[in-house]
Image (cartoon, grey):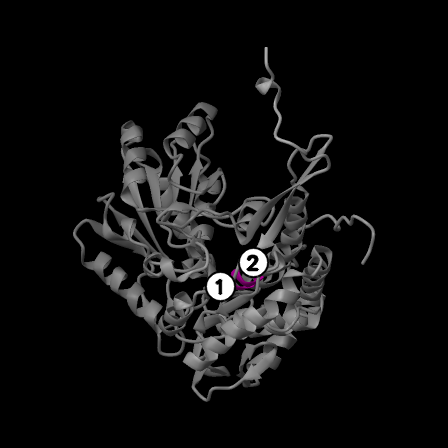
Amino acid sequence: MSNAIFSLPESHNEAILSYAPGSKERALLKAELERQFNQEIEIPLIIGGKEVRTGKIQKAVCPHDHQHVLARYHEAGEAEIRLAIDAALAAKKDWEATPWQDRAAIFHKMASLISGKYRYILNAATMLNQSKSAYQAEIDATCETADFLRFNAKFMEDIYKQQPISDPHVWNRVDYRPLEGFVLAVTPFNFTAIGANLATAPAIMGNTVVWKPASTSVLSNYYLMQLFKEAGLPDGVINFIPGRGSVIGKIVLDDPNFAGLHFTGSTGVFNSMWKTIGDNLSRYKSYPRLVGETGGKDYIFMHASADLEETTAAIVRAGFEYQGQKCSACSRVYIPASRWAEVKERILALLAEIKMGDVRDFRNFFNAVIDEAAFDQTMKYIELARNAKDAEIIAGGKGDKSKGYFIEPTVVVTTDPKFVTMEEEIFAPVVTIYVYDDAKLEETLQLLDQTSPYALTGAIFARDRYTINQLTKALANTAGNFYINDKCTGAVVGHQPFGGARASGTNDKAGSLLNLIRWTSPRTIKESFTPPRDIKFPFLEAE
């Protein structure tokens, strides 16, 4: 045991590589893309550090080339789910007793491996299996993942430093224990970094984890598990079990040792899990911690004073980068009538520049939606808009799933501020615009506030400071991440802690100390150096 109080290296954000023509990183990524594209691997479960094969096989494919199989992965059944729980509980004693600085060193090692050896592995897997462009994969799979690992280690140190006041004869301290039991991490397809963070954030605080990854991001998530192992994460701390959510959820949420849920996904699924947990409260050793980021209906609101090019670039980038499948993607826009003609012209000009196709062609800004279910559901919304009397499609509107799940960037304009595509989450490349009367600014702000049950991200564009203050105040509860003269996507770890309220989640702010604190169960310790030796008090003395 070392007799020193350690300080971690200062956190920093991983530098984003450009992948410009002629660059070294472009050549390395293209080579890794070809390597992964031209092989088919087998992905087992990883439980207690051991590879487990169930024989129940599913395929991991390219959404932009859905007949091309990248991997075949094993799905967990009831026996394997219970085995993963047992492995997490078996690893718990040694892991929670590991000194915090040793845990931190493992996570810093992970970040360093991502910066180097695993950069192109994770980026290529994310591009191929999740249909992301080179830039979108870089900011996600490499940079944000490394940022989470480094910053979370520092947040852990900051939490442990927070200690209560003591007096000359009493030493008060707080012991930040992990939760009593195991944590279930349920992660989405759209960000490799979210998969990494939801599994590792509880682990860095001394918890052990059962990780259910999305079926459409298994490839990159499997490589994360290899990276965790190489960095020195002990067996059983994180257990990797792809499988059906309904099967995994039922078994895990019934277990008396279930201690917490770290979730990103749909509002409906989170609500269902919360209800099940509530029904099972009498089973558990303690009240489970529930941390969830769920749906969104993110917006951009333009004031008449706003800059045209800034606003329109934000609409196109926030609406159509990664095919509108970011949690923060813009899907509804409010434009003043006095500016609509020029806004429309500029948006159509920007959309004309977008090329769509295979991720291996770096000229493509735009790729495929994640799977056939997403394609079919999106096309239903587009057809609804096409046939509506109070809506018009002014760009896009076509889809083709013969080779890949491609849907054109689609812009709908509606005269109904509560048209279905203004209200419901679509999670696809569909942006709906409502043109409002400049004289009805206050009324339109109220409409925005009341239109959607979600409150994840939102952005305003205006030049006048009084107007900026007015809009910021009026929209205070509409977004957990609020942007002034910037697009509503692109939160950076350590800069813009991410999460929303209302039907968008518990707002526990991934990328900040606020999320890490949820994975602790503090114990206050009071040690008296001069404890009382009798029961006498001055007030008991005779006059």
Among the 4 quarters of the image, the one containing residue 384: bottom left
Q: Nearer the viewer, residue 256 or 160?
A: 256
Q: Residues within 10 Å of mark 2 (few under 14, many from 20)?
A: many
User: Which of marks 2 and 1 precedes in the sequence?
Assistant: 1
Quadrant where the N terminus lies? Answer: bottom right
Kindly identify the residue that appears in the image at 39 percent across and 69 percent down: 406
- Report the amino acid beneath label 1: Ala
367, above or below 508, in the image: below
Name the residue that disc number 2 marks.
202
Using the rendered image of the protein, determine whether residue 62 is visible from the camera's viewpoint: yes
67, above or below 428, in the image: below
Tell me residue 6's x, y (percent).
78, 50
Verify CB contact (< 8 Å) between mark 1 and mark 2. yes
Name the residue that disc number 1 marks.
185
Left or right placement of residue 396 versus residue 92 in this view: left
The main secondary structure of the magenta stretch is helix
Tell me residue 265's x, y (percent).
41, 60
In magenta, the rendered stretch is 194-202
- Report the amino acid beneath label 2: Pro
Disc 2 secondary structure class: helix
Q: Residues within 10 Å of mark 1 (few under 14, many from 20)?
A: many
Tell me residue 141's x, y (percent).
58, 63
Disc 1 secondary structure class: strand
Q: CA distance from mark 1 to mark 2?
A: 9 Å
Residue found at the very far bottom of the displayed protein = 55
Left or right placement of residue 237 versus residue 71 in this view: right
Q: Nearer the viewer, residue 259 or 137?
A: 259
Left or right placement of residue 420 versus residue 139 in this view: left
